[in-house]
Amino acid sequence: MSFHMIAVIIYHMLSNVEKEKLVIVLYYNQRKNVRQVAQEARMSFRDIAAILKKKDSSQSW
């Protein structure tokens, strides 16, 4: 199997909590834009926006 195929399999096995952590790391720590995060995490813009909105609202308190 190719590396790309293995990476796809691993991303499908991530839990929701792990995907949220991945989105936060990619967006805030690695400074990737939403499009890059969507490609790497294999998530929709809508799901990424929901995660980022939840994180922003939790930090405001």
Image (tube, grey):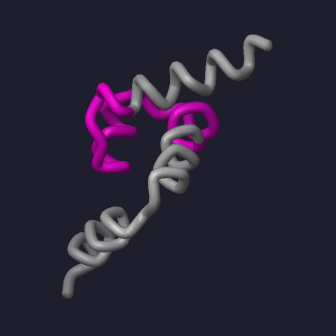
- Picture residue at 21% right of the left edge, 81% below the top: 2
Q: Quadrant of the C terminus?
A: top right
Q: Residue 37 or 50: which is nearer the viewer?
A: 50
Residue 55 percent location from the top left of the image:
61, 26
Residue 6 percent location from the top left of the image:
29, 77
**How many numbered marks appear?**
0
| Residue furthest right as drawn | 61
Q: Quadrant of the N terminus?
A: bottom left
- Picture residue at 54% right of the left edge, 51% below the top: 17
* Left or right: 5 in relation to 56: left
Quadrant hosting residue 44: top left
**13 in relation to 6, above or below:** above
* Left or right: 61 in relation to 55: right
Quadrant hosting residue 12: bottom left
Residue 41 percent location from the top left of the image:
37, 49
Residue 56 percent location from the top left of the image:
62, 18
Residues rendered magenta in the picture: 25-47
**21 in relation to 2, above or below:** above
- Picture residue at 51% right of the left edge, 44% below the top: 20
In reply to whether residue 29 is colored magenta, the answer given is: yes
| Residue furthest bottom as drawn | 1
Quadrant hosting residue 30: top right
**53 in relation to 35, above or below:** above
In reply to whether residue 26 is colored magenta, the answer given is: yes
- Picture residue at 38% right of the left edge, 28% below the top: 34
Q: Main secondary structure of the magenta part?
A: helix
| Residue furthest top as drawn | 60
